[in-house]
Image (cartoon, grey):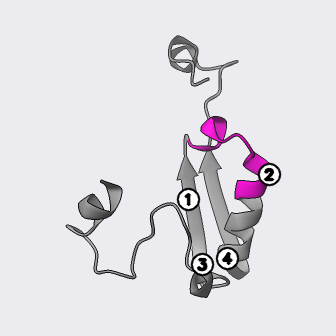
Amino acid sequence: VYKQYWTNFFDEGHFACFEIPSNWENSFDVVTSFFVLEHVLEPQKLIQTVFDLLKDGGKFYFQVPNFQDNFIDRLFPTN
């Protein structure tokens, strides 16, 4: 289902579902992740994968819920 959806927006080879192509290593200037890490069983493994994708000096920007300071994040627990 995901692959069929993404083909509406990108050519084959410009997106990945479930497996990251090995030729993408060291090829990204920036990787972003918004409200994903709190759903991952092994976040350290995902973070290592992100760093493998980044070029030297690349940046990883991510956001996770702030349950302590943001009332809305408490209303919608993720796990």
Taking the spot 67% from the left edge, 84% from the top edge, the residue there is: 26
Q: Which mark is residue 32?
A: 1
* Residue closer to the observer: 1 or 63: 1
How many labels sit on residues?
A: 4
Which element type, helix, strand or loop, lies under badge 4? Answer: strand
Query: Which numbered disc, 4 or 3, marks the residue closer to the eye?
Result: 4
Q: Main secondary structure of the magenta part?
A: helix
Residue 30 appears in which quarter of the rendering? bottom right
- Mark 3 lies on residue: 29
Question: Separation of disc 2 and disc 3 at Cα?
Answer: 20 Å
Q: Position of residue 46 (x, y in %)?
A: 70, 56
Q: Are marks 4 and 3 in contact (CB under 8 Å)?
A: yes
What is the span of residues highlighted in magenta in the rendered image?
36-46
Q: CA distance from mark 2 to mark 1?
A: 15 Å
Residue 61 image offset from top left, x and y in percent:
62, 57
Disc 4 crowd rating (10 Å Cα; few below 14, some 14-19, many 20+) is some
The amino acid type, in three-letter code, at marker 1 is Thr
Q: Give the label, 2 or 3, closer to the camera.
A: 2
- Whichever of callouts 2 and 1 sits on the residue coming sooner in the sequence is 1
Indicate which disc residue 44 carries. 2
39 within the magenta span: yes
Q: Amino acid at mark 2?
A: Gln
- According to the image, label 4 marks what residue? 54
